[in-house]
Every structure is written in C-alpha cells, then in structure tokens.
Amino acid sequence: MTPFDRLDRSQSPDLPDGRHAQILALLKDAGSVRVESLVETLGVSTATVRRDLQQLDNQGLLTRVFGGARLVTETSFAPRAQAHVTEKARIAKRAAALVAPGETIAMETGTTVLAVASGLDVSGLTVVTNSVDVLLATQPRTDIKVLLTGGAFEPTIRSLYGPLVERFYAEHQVDRLFIGAGSVSREGLRDSNIEAIGAKRAAIASARRTVVVADSSKFELTALTLVAPWSQITTLVTDAGAPEAELDAVRAAGVEVIVA
C-alpha cells in the first residue's frame, strides 16, 4: 500500500483547506510528492496543484522542487526570513513602538515577530517566548528579562510547542502578545502548522492585548486552520500593499489596523 492509498478521503479535495491537509499528510508519510501524482490523487488540475504547492511553500510548510515538493528542512526558516524584508522592517518598527517600558510581552514564532523582537527599544521588559530565535535576539539585552516557555522543539519553525507551552500560558498573563500569521482572512488569523495551533491559542488567551504582525502577502494565502477570530485580536499591523476591502472588514470587526 502506498501513502496515496492511505489518503483520508474525508478531507474534501474540492476545498483548498482539504487539499492542503492531504498534501501535507502525504508529505509527512512519503517525504516528497510529485505534481502528476497529486493531480491524479486529488482529482484537480495541474495548475491547481502547483498553486497549492506554492501557497504551502510560501508558508514554509514544504519546499518546492522541480516536478513536485519535499518536506521542509531545518534551514527552511532562512529563506522565509529573506522574503518581504522591507515590508517586515516597517511593520516591526510600528509594532515595537506599541510597547511601553516595564511591560510583560509574549512573542510567538515567525520572521516578522522576530523583527519586532530585534527592534524593541524600551527597557525593563519581560519577554515570554517559545521561539528560539526571539530568545537569541533578546538575550544580549541586559535590561530585558526573557522567560522560555519550555516544550517540544520543532526544528522547521525553530520554536517550542505542545502541552508545556499551553500550560505555561494557562498559568500566566501578559500585557501584550505579538503573533504572526500563516494567512490573514476576513474570519481572522489562520495557520497550517497543526502542532503549533494549541500554543498559539493559549498565548492569545493569556494576553490582555494581541497584536498580529503580517505583511500584505499573507492576505493572498489560505492557511489550513483558524487560530483565532478577529474578536480575539486587538491590533493588526500590516503594510500598504494589503487590500483595502480586507482591511475594512478587519476594522469592522473592531480591530485597530495600523498600516506601516
């Protein structure tokens, strides 16, 4: 029996979320997939498969190769850090300016959140994080106290996840959370890293204010799972390339929108 024979047919290939879930399941099982095999298995066009693979690659969940895709490697974080650098820098500067001296802030994983951490310019902060990169970025600052949540290490996103992270946030409260996004929709914040969803939701529940930092490319993606609706988000910081109609929908949900 091949990995394709073990495919969960309950996840409909007619919907992007269902296709993405099936592609990721096949990758986890086989390590790589071919476009022609996905076309046959999912019953969709070559163009649709290629678009799905590109969206998942943009989210760092797989690596595109000639004729198909393979599992991401531990170095996959690096290419994502080089994407939309100018926009992320502007977003990070505006987001970091929201922090007041003496606050306790939580910082989730992701390249834009890492840029915020690197740009913090106030003192007396306590930073809670499950991100190894945020830890390294803030460690040289003697005026910042850093608390690592603990948890299982996920090398592809260089962060910790699992029950220990969730328990930490359940037992603590922070003034402000900075969190990235696999994609941004009118519903809210979405992500495709299933194992990390629990940690993200726990972090949001622990925060008095939650700030989503996401460049405009995230409005073009469709991530697998809704992490949180806009009713649980305080602020969205994005760049001028974000579609105005989508931003209006976010504002209508009561979220402060800052365009960097």
Image (cartoon, rainbow, N blue to C red):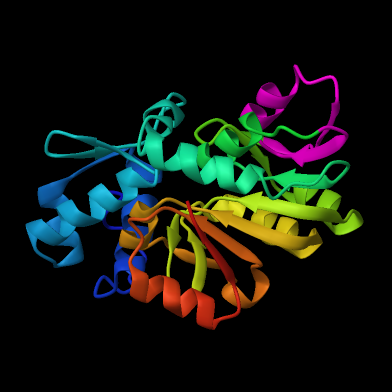
User: From where the camera sits, is residue 164 visible?
Assistant: yes
Q: Position of residue 69 (x, y in %)?
A: 24, 39
Front residue (pair 49, 173)? 173
Q: Position of residue 152 (x, y in %)?
A: 69, 37
Front residue (pair 233, 63)? 233
Question: From what the image shows, is residue 87 above or below residue 40?
Answer: above
- Asked whether residue 198 is drawn in magenta, I would say no
Q: Position of residue 205 (x, y in %)?
A: 76, 64
Front residue (pair 28, 218)? 218
Residue at horizontal 29 percent and vertical 73 percent from the top = 15
Residue 232 image-quadrant placement: bottom right
- Is residue 205 rendered to the left or right of residue 239? right
Count of number-bearing discs? 0
Q: Which residues are magenta?
A: 123-152
Residue at horizontal 51 percent and vertical 37 percent from the top = 111
Residue at horizontal 29 percent and vertical 52 percent from the top = 55
Front residue (pair 191, 20)? 191
- Asked whether residue 148 is drawn in magenta, I would say yes
- Is residue 153 rendered to the left or right of residue 103? left
User: From where the camera sits, is residue 186 visible?
Assistant: no
Q: Position of residue 185 (x, y in %)?
A: 42, 70
- Is residue 157 rendered to the left or right of residue 208? left
In this view, the residue farthest toward the top is: 140
